[in-house]
Image: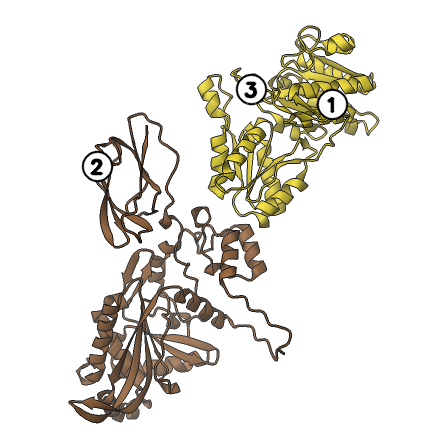
Amino acid sequence: MVTTMIMQRMSVAMEYGVILKWLKKEGDKVKKGDLVVEIFGEKNEFELEAPDDGIILKILCDVNDEIPISEPIAYIGKEGDAIPEARPKKLNAASVAPPTPKAAPVASVQTSTVVTSQASPQNTETRLPGGKIKASPRAKKKAKELGVDLSFVIGTGPEGRIVEKDVTATKESTPQVTISDDRKVRQVETMTPLRRTIARRMTQSALNPHITMITEIDMTEAVALRKEINLKVEKVHGIRVSFNDIIVKAVADTLELFPKFNATLAGNDLHMFDEVNIGVAMATDDGLIVVTIRDANKKSITEIAVETKEKGKLAKMNKLAPEELTGSTFTISNLGPFKVDLFIPVINPPETAILALGQIKKKPVVVDDVIAIRSMMMASCAVDHRVLDGAPAGQFLAALKETLENPFMMKM
Amino acid sequence: MTDMVYREALKAGIREEMLRDERVFLLGEDIGLNWGGAFKVTKGLAEEFGVERVRDTPISENTIVGAAVGASITGMIPVAEIMFGDLITLAMDQVCNQAAKMRYMFGGQTSVPLVLRTVFGGGKNIASHHSQSLEAWFMHTPGLKVAVPAFASDVKGLIKTAIRDPDPVLFAEHKLVYDKKEEVPDEEYLIPFGEAKVRREGADVTIWGTFIMLHKALEVAEELQKEGISVEVIDPRTLVPLDKKTLIESVKKTGRLVLVTEETKTGATTAEIAAIVQEEAFDWLDAPIKRVNAPDTPVPFSPPLENYFIPDNKRIAQAVRDIV
């Protein structure tokens, strides 16, 4: 008699368990109740017991495999017993996250090449070598008919292949838009490749759980600092340092202390970057692009200002090289120039966090129990809740606030 | 309708044609008086029609087919039997170089209305010389028609069509289907060549196969239905001419195909079918085409080994699950 050892439900909300460590190996004798394997279910670690006496005939899953409740994980029996054929479904066998689409050349948002190759294991199942999407001919045909972008589709077929029903499911989950006859269409504008890239990446990002922290930052000191810098910079470089440049510097310095905000989640691994490359979101006629200021933590405010102005000019003329648009590790989006007070951003994937800034406005605020007029700015920081929780997000925002409210303490 | 085993339905078809047309005669080893063939298909026919029309021959396959070819071009309609399909090798020249090519090489001045009955397949523990499935050889030979009936109701209609066909027909039977019972129409009927039969309708996977594998596939389909997998089962009934249309339409519906025959895998009929489907229905495939065949070895004599050699329900079911 072969007894099947299954992934047991150890808590109400547990849907699957992750194999942490096998305490027994194939061929080991066990008694009913012996601890056989350590697992992680929902929020805790557990040890699963042998359901029967016997020897471990076969172990069906490896460390780090994600096994749904009730799936077999091992067989226990007598020597020579035939091993049943049933094998567990492994959640990690098929990609559970949507694949990272390849950025179009104009797209602003991709990690550096080194990082991309590290991030690829997440997608090996739905991607063929060379990045081609693994989809059946029928799925490809269906996707064409329905106008579904396969890079949005999560493959559930054998070995993670995208099959027809995955395409239809994706289509059905996307709201159907039809133009009814009684409304006159003045003009139809096909989305540009950049627009489509933005659409795809933002949709992908929105699938991940965001949480957003909001604070108000007193920029009065930063206003003074800017004035002082610009007295010299304007003469030497012919440009003016913007608040944004000061904020880029402050964010870069703060990120040195918060490596998880300067990272990318690839599969189950969080890759934290050495470089602090700040993406500065900019509006162009065609849409949003993000220019990258590399190693911003090692540059002065003036250097950042000069570089940002130059790149912004080229970006608006569509003349930036792809490498100047990619490789950011954290993004800042500033809508202050548009008189926006506050907004809630969507993370620029595959980054883990983003900072959104509103306009700087003079406001009456209480300082030392006295009402004072101060230059205030609302800021919000959204983090990927898969990676980061509210507390670190709050700490990050508090540290940034501290830096910006005491800007003369920054390493210039 | 009468419940009838395959063997009886086949005999009934032959008998009807012998009654209808006196040019029809049978020849083969031990097919005649008292014995009625190794698988008893012709039992009683010698008694009914006489030894002139049901002729026992020496143990010489080359002679049997050679004589049948000669008789057929002089206007007779021979139904020759090769006791085991494996032994057709001894008559290969007559089958593939003579019978198959005469109409073409003589510019249509003669035809060879010959039926060559034989039996393929294992499962009887009678070793490598009596258990093979060699239908692909004849499918590969232009000029031959190849019938592969697997059910009693089909074999009767198909043998009658084969006997009336003006060209040589390799009429392949299978040892394990002789005893399979089915309702067979009482009235006369013919089944045209090149018309497959959908033995079971389904939505998720198409199984195409021949002979005993179809019977297994139907059992598997029933079993998988309980798992929520809906399987369509197609019997081609003839390999030449081949009904591509029914198969392609089915694949376009289900998007998945499992090919199941008892042949050794390399160069089997399943390989040809897989090639056809990817040529004609590539865009409809939702999964790679799966083949379930025997391994590329001689058929083993040892019963446990032979059991392993012949695809079973488990392997067929697994192939389906692998692609769903």
Which chain does the residue under circle 3 lie in? B
Residue at which label 2 appears: A33
Residue B57 location (% of width, % of height): 70, 9
Q: Is residue A47 above or below residue A194?
A: above
Chain painted yellow: B
Provide the secondary structure element on which disc 1 rests: helix
**Residue B99 circle label:** 1
Q: CA distance from mark 2 to mark 3?
A: 52 Å
Residue at which label 3 appears: B131
Instruction: State which mark lies toward you, 2 or 1.
Output: 2
Residue A121 location (% of width, % of height): 36, 54
Q: CA distance from mark 2 to mark 1?
A: 73 Å
Chain A is which colour? Answer: brown
Looking at the picture, tell me which residue is in the foreground, B306 or A296: B306
Q: Is residue A265 above or below residue A276?
A: above
Q: Amino acid at mark 1?
A: Ala
Q: Do the residues at discs 2 and 1 belong to one chain? A: no
